[in-house]
Image (spheres, helix red, strand yellow):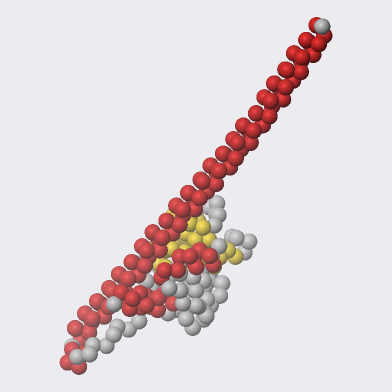
Amino acid sequence: MKLKYNSIIVFVFFFNYSFSCDCKPIDRENIIEKGLKLSEIVFYGEVIKVDSVSKTFTFRIIELFKGKYNSQYIKGKEFTSCSILPIQKQLWIVYADFRKDKTMIDISGCAPSIGFNPPQNSFPPPPQISNPYKRKEKQLELLSESVWKLQLENENLIDWIYQLERLRAYKKSQEKNHDQQKTEVKNEIYSKYIIISLIANIVLFLSLIFVILKKKNLAK
């Protein structure tokens, strides 16, 4: 049943872009690795401005996982029919590429970017109720649709939290590797310093012996 719901969420996410994008399916276990590999910038942020006419948007970056960007705010645009335009002002996990000399981003519909809430117009129809008598009851149908929508929202939330935690674990591992590399560089520099100091002391010691021997020879 869990696998069924996860498949549904994948369908929901790509529903609006399936007709314009040739997206290869990504299984949940590899979604973070492929998203990081195929994207120039990955971050957790909040949509603060959307212009549906110019098809532009602005994010406030809350946490950066990949890429470098000096400002807390980053702008984007729906450049192609395969691009995502985040209409709802909400929290997002974004996998994107830079455009226009890195002044704007393009969120591909094939990337695993995900909003805190799924798009309201992208819910697939609920499964048909097998009992013919129940189908005639309007209230039961509405209740079924509400439960179905709630299940999709719940699965979307689970996937959203899953991605966020995995990305934070990735960031932590990168920082750990970076600190380890810095430590290794420091140790290497310190080792070179010790070697140079030893060589200098040996040269100084040999020079001192040479001076002493020379003085003894002169004394004779």
Which residue is farthest front?
A: 220
Q: Determine whether, in the image, residue 3 is placed left or right of residue 49.
A: left
Residue 99 drawn at (x, y percent): 60, 65
Image quadrant holding the N terminus, namely bottom left
Residue 3 percent coordinates (x, y): 33, 76
Where residue 68 appears, as percent x and y from the top left, is: 55, 54
Instruction: Give whichever of 43, 188 is nearer the camera.
Output: 188
Identify the residue shown where x is 37% and y is 71%.
118
From the viewer's side, name the closer residue of 46 and 98.
98
Q: Is residue 79 visible?
A: yes
Residue 176 vs 167, above or below: the answer is above
Q: Residue at x 51, y 45 (%)?
A: 179
Does 87 appear above or below 22? above
Q: Is residue 120 in sight in this rendering?
A: no
Question: Residue at position x 27%, y 73% from top?
Answer: 150
Residue 107 relative to residue 138: left or right: right
Residue depicted at 67% across the width and 31% down the height: 196
Quadrant location, the C terminus: top right
The answer to whether residue 27 is above or below residue 190 is: below
Q: Looking at the picture, how far across and down is residue 112, in whole percent?
A: 45, 69
